[in-house]
Amino acid sequence: MAQRTRDRGAASIFVLAIGLFLVGAGIAGAMVASARVARHAARNAADLAALAGATHAIEGAQAACAAARRYAEANAARLTSCEVSGLEVVVRAEVPVRSSTLRATAAARAGPVE
């Protein structure tokens, strides 16, 4: 007669636990990567919007901010603020993080070099 042991199925539970851990780590890694991509997209959109606004700063704040908004929206971002001081333009842009309710934000400044 074979002797029965009490730990039957322990390996299956262990493998399941390891698998769940790996799935959770993969999901967490994907969320971090998505946040980083959104942050870079927000930076790019803010930089381009500030440069576009600075090229129109001589025409006034309304024209500069309108150009900045167009460039931000073309880069899938939302312009949250635009300030024009002389020929210098400061903008803030935000991009939604995929599969999350969070938003990545960035600010940029453009104008003449003194």
Image: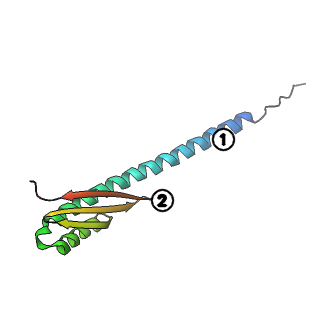
> Is residue 56 shown to the viewer in this render?
no
Residue 94's label in the rendered image is none
Residue hosting label 1:
16
Contact between labelled residues 2 and 1, with CB atoms less than 8 Å apart = no
Using the image, determine if residue 7 lies above or below residue 107.
Answer: above
Q: Residue furthest right?
A: 1
Give the residue type at disc 1: Leu
Kind of element beneath mark 1:
helix
Residue hosting label 2:
100
Q: Is residue 80 left or right of residue 84?
A: right
Mark nearest the camera among 1 and 2 is 2
Q: Which callout, 1 or 2, points at the residue further toward the start of the chain?
A: 1
Q: Quadrant of residue 45?
A: bottom left
Q: Residue at x 71, y 34 (%)?
A: 11
Q: Quadrant of residue 1?
A: top right
Give the residue type at disc 2: Ser
Q: Residue at x 68, y 36 (%)?
A: 14
Q: Quadrant of residue 20?
A: top right
Q: Residue at x 70, y 37 (%)?
A: 12
Q: In the image, residue 87 lies at what x, y percent?
A: 13, 64
Q: Could you say which is closer to the camera, residue 21 or residue 5? A: 21
